[in-house]
Image (cartoon, helix red, strand yellow):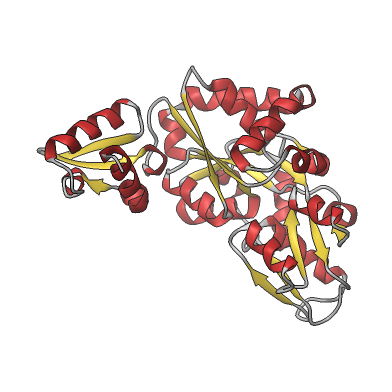
Amino acid sequence: MSAKEKILAYLKERGHEGAFQSELYNLNYSRSTIAEAIESLERDRKILRRGLGKKTYRVWIVEEAPFPIEGTLRLGLLKALEYPHALLSAKDLEGKYDVRVVVYDSALELTNALSLGKVDLACSPLITQVLFALLTKNLKIAAGCGFGGGGVVVRENLKKGIKIGSSELSTMETMLKLFLEKHNLIGRVQVVYFKKPEEIVKAFLKGEIDALSIWEPYLSELEKLGFKTYRYVQTFGLYPCCTLGVNYEFLRLNKELFYKFIESYKENTEKLEQRREEAIKLMEKFFGFSSEQIRNGFDGFLYDYKLTKDQIEVTLKFFGVKVFNLDSLLLTKGF
C-alpha cells in the first residue's frame, strides 16, 4: 500500500473526526514521504486540512469533513431508484463545481451525515429529516423527491405471528404501520429492523423473516420471483417517501451552487422521460443495480420536486407527529 493509500484508509477509518496531521507521520513511512503524499492528496482535493493553531492541522477526506466546503457539493443518496433527477442534476453541474455523490445504506446514517455537514444535500425519508431538523436545527427540507415506490412482500400468507423486516424511522416503517392497522395486525406480528436493504432481502430469502417492507427496485425484483406483493400506493394513494434536504451551513456558504442545483433538479424532474436512459446508466454506476432491475422498478415511483406543507402535515400525522412550527423546517412552503 502506498503512502497515499495508507493516509486515505486511515482517514476514512477516522470518519468525520479526522486526524491531526502529526498522527499521519506514524504510518510507517518517512516524514518527507508522508508530507509529499499529503500535499499531493490536497492538490487533488481528496483530503482537506484546517489549521487549529501554530503548525497544528486536522485532516479529513473530503467526503467525511463535517463542514461545507466552498465550491463543493456532496450529494448523499440511499440505494434506491428514487433519485434519477438528483443524479442527473449532479452530473449537469460537474465541471463547473466539485460535485460528489456519496451513497449510504442507512437512512439514519445519511440524515445524520446531512445534519453533521458531511454531506451538503441528501435525499432521505421525510420523517427522518423532520426529526433531525427538530433535534439539531442544522437542516431544512428543500423539495420533494419521490412519491410511492414501496410495499410489503409476503412469503406465504399475511397473518398473526409472522416476522416482518423493515428499516427504522423511515417511510417504509410508517407505511408498514398503516398497512398492519388496516389488516388488524398491530401488536400481532413481530417487526424486525435492519440497517441495509440487502440485509432485509437476504433474511427474507433465507426464511429468517416471513415478510418485509421494502422499496424499489427490491420490491419489483421480489414480485418477479413470485412472492405476494402489496403496493402501498394501491391502498393509501400517493405519499411522499424521500425529500431533498439541505445542510443550513452549506446553504449559507454555497447559496449560488445550491440554487443552481435546484434549478437543474426541477428541470430534470420535468424532463425525466427524455433522459431516462442516461439516468438508468447513472443508477447502474452509483448503486450497482443491473439495468434490468432499474427498468423493472423505474416506474414504481412518481418523481416530483413539488412538496406542499399540507402533504408533509398529513404524512407526519401518520407517524403521530405534530410540528407546531413546520415552516421553520422548510426552505420554502412548497414549489
* Residue that sits furthest to the top in the current view: 96
Which corner quadrant of the image does residue 207 belong to? bottom right
Q: Does residue 74 appear left or right of residue 172 in this picture?
A: left
Residue 180 image point, x, y percent: 81, 70
Q: If the image is split into quadrants, where does the C terminus sit?
A: top right
Residue 220 image point, x, y percent: 81, 50
Q: Measuring 75% from the left and 36% from the top, which residue is drawn there?
A: 303
Q: Measuring 48% from the left and 52% from the top, which residue is drawn there?
A: 112
Q: Measuring 66% from the left and 72% from the top, which residue is drawn there?
A: 192
Q: Measuring 44% from the left and 35% from the top, which residue is drawn there?
A: 250
Which corner quadrant of the image does residue 281 belong to? top right
Q: Nearer the viewer, residue 317 or 171?
A: 171
| 185, above or below 213, in the image | below
Q: Nearer the viewer, residue 11 or 202?
A: 202
- Please indicate, yes or no, whether residue 211 appears anywhere in the rendered image: yes
| 282, above or below 106, in the image | above
Q: Does residue 247 appear left or right of residue 12 in this picture?
A: right
* Residue that sits furthest to the front in the current view: 1
| 321, above or below 304, in the image | below
Q: Does residue 277 appear left or right of residue 121 in this picture?
A: right
Residue 107 image point, x, y percent: 58, 54
